[in-house]
Image (cartoon, helix red, strand yellow):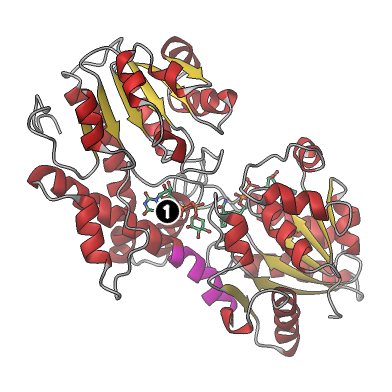
Amino acid sequence: FGKVSKVVCVGAGYVGGPTCAMIAHKCPHVTVTVVDMNKEKIAEWNSDKLPIYEPGLDDIVFAARGRNLFFSSDIPKAIAEADLIFISVNTPTKMYGRGKGMAPDLKYVESVSRTIAQYAVGPKIVVEKSTVPVKAAESIGCILREAQKNNANLKFQVLSNPEFLAEGTAMKDLANPDRVLIGGESSTEGLQAVAELVRIYENWVPRERIITTNTWSSELSKLVANAFLAQRISSINSISAVCEATGAEISEVAHAVGFDTRIGNKFLKASVGFGGSCFQKDVLSLVYLCESLNLPQVAEYWQGVINVNNWQRRRFADKIIAELFNTVTDKKIAIFGFAFKKNTGDTRESSAIHVMKHLMEEHAKLSVYDPKVQKSQMINDLAAVTSADDVTRLVTVETDPYAAARGAHAIVVLTEWDEFVDLDYNKIHDNMQHPAAIFDGRLILDQKALREIGFRTFAIGTAPDQAYNLFGTAGY
Ligand code: NAD
Ligand code: UDX
């Protein structure tokens, strides 16, 4: 393999777009082309309004685009010219057939592998950027070796290089990663391919933070990293229920526990449950892998992380219903936030979808506001878990939080957007039905100040204030 000067990324999504923008930004001597089968998405990447919202992304894309960063729908041409190809396509949980609801769907990864086999004309380093189960590189390699048999000019090495960026902080994470992980074969050519990819990252990542391993360790480490992170959230969320029942405060417990340097203070924020396209999918993928390997105890252990998450969402919805006098039928409830976390417009697996579904089953009238999520996205997400009719009947989408709360019996905070902290809650309270309640699923609001205004307040992991708690923990 020669020196890499042309990088191609197949998949212009939340990972492919930002990652390649960062490579183009940090490696002016490398030409980076991002391709996708979705032509509209490519057109958006080439427009003034990029298809994803990510702080800091616009600046980097607008500076590099047309210089050494290109977005294209011509996949065959890009593949033919590339020295190194990232596969960065989606690997969602399979919703049919064998492994339904558990295994990741690898059809897009396989289809890209076949496209590479078809259009490659010379040596290529193929890099698995998508999150995949252990041994996926073997399947990609098998498809590529078949093409090699018919064309002596072809030569492939498959590497694993999982991505650890988090949405909302993707550009910071890419610019200053805790580590970059590269897995490859230990053959001479394997090591050479790894060295080429290391050379790309070395343009901005200190060498000691670039970890090289065998391919399978790299693939597995990605699943394990996400499983550990998700596990911390389920751990703290499980304790939030104990706090609510006892008078302990979850933020105080998290602080006290996290001060132990062996435990650490990150990822201990209790919430209405983790969302996003990765955690549930990757933990389920690990569970499925363990089941396939006949390790039922390990599978059951990790399945517990998902079970607690689903329970937390349900528990929060049940709390809202119980505290609104055990009926939310026809009551207007304002929903603050629909994205799965702040600073993103992404709604995949957002807990908001699940909490709203539970409330819609009780015929609540929901009025939603989110600063970054499009109305059509919310409608589609909710219709997928209820029905289009229910959504039309029960959901309105507002472009302003004050309008969402006007005439409502309660406000439910589901995403921790900073702007929710600074709203004029006096004004909001004046325009609501009384008694007015606030349910903080993200622990961002000042409960005491809200109570002084006159709100009944309920927060995850906080024992209800007896003066305002009419039903105690009944039905909870
Ligand atoms: P995404 O859905 O945003 O983007 C994937 C893109 O791939 C889509 O635009 C789709 O059109 C394109 N695509 C699919 N099949 C194709 C094909 N055969 N040819 C050309 N284009 C094709 O997905 P994402 O969030 O960027 O995730 C990609 C991978 O990275 C997944 O495996 C995911 O688990 C992993 N990952 C995601 C994140 C994250 O925060 N989103 C973080 C780390 C890792
Ligand atoms: C995650 C991983 O962090 C990242 O390394 C991986 O590459 C992709 O998956 P992401 O899903 O984008 O990233 O966001 P993350 O910040 O991990 O949050 C995931 C969910 O957990 C969000 O819903 C967030 O609100 C929730 N969360 C996070 C908590 O509830 N409490 C916490 O303490 C941290």
Total of numbered circles in the picture? 1
Task: Point out the image quarter for the N terminus.
Answer: bottom right
Q: Residue at x 34, y 26 (%)?
A: 425
Label 1 packing within 10 angstroms: few (<14), some (14-19), many (20+): many
Residue 279: horizontal and vertical position, in percent?
A: 44, 53
Frontmost residue, 439 versus 9 = 439
Residue 27: horizontal and vertical position, in percent?
A: 79, 69
Q: Residue at x 29, y 58 (%)?
A: 300
Left or right: 208 in relation to 279: right
Residue pointed to by mark 1: 284
Left or right: 191 in relation to 335: right
Q: Quadrant of residue 78?
A: bottom right
Q: What is the secondary structure assignment of the residue under circle 1?
A: helix
Frontmost residue, 274 versus 139 = 274
Residue 77 can be seen in this image: yes
Which amino acid type corresponds to the residue marked 1 in the rendered image? Answer: Leu
Task: Point out the image quarter for the C terminus.
Answer: top left
Residue 455 can be seen in this image: no
Residue 437: horizontal and vertical position, in percent?
A: 24, 24
Left or right: 334 in relation to 436: right
Residue 254: horizontal and vertical position, in percent?
A: 25, 58
Left or right: 135 in relation to 252: right
Q: Which span of residues is magenta-colored?
A: 212-225
Q: Quadrant of residue 208?
A: bottom right
Q: Residue at x 31, y 15 (%)?
A: 430
Q: Quadrant of residue 352?
A: top left
In the figure, 177 relative to 39: above or below?
below
Q: Residue at x 26, y 55 (%)?
A: 236
Determine if the magenta segment contains residue 442.
no
Frontmost residue, 464 versus 90 = 464
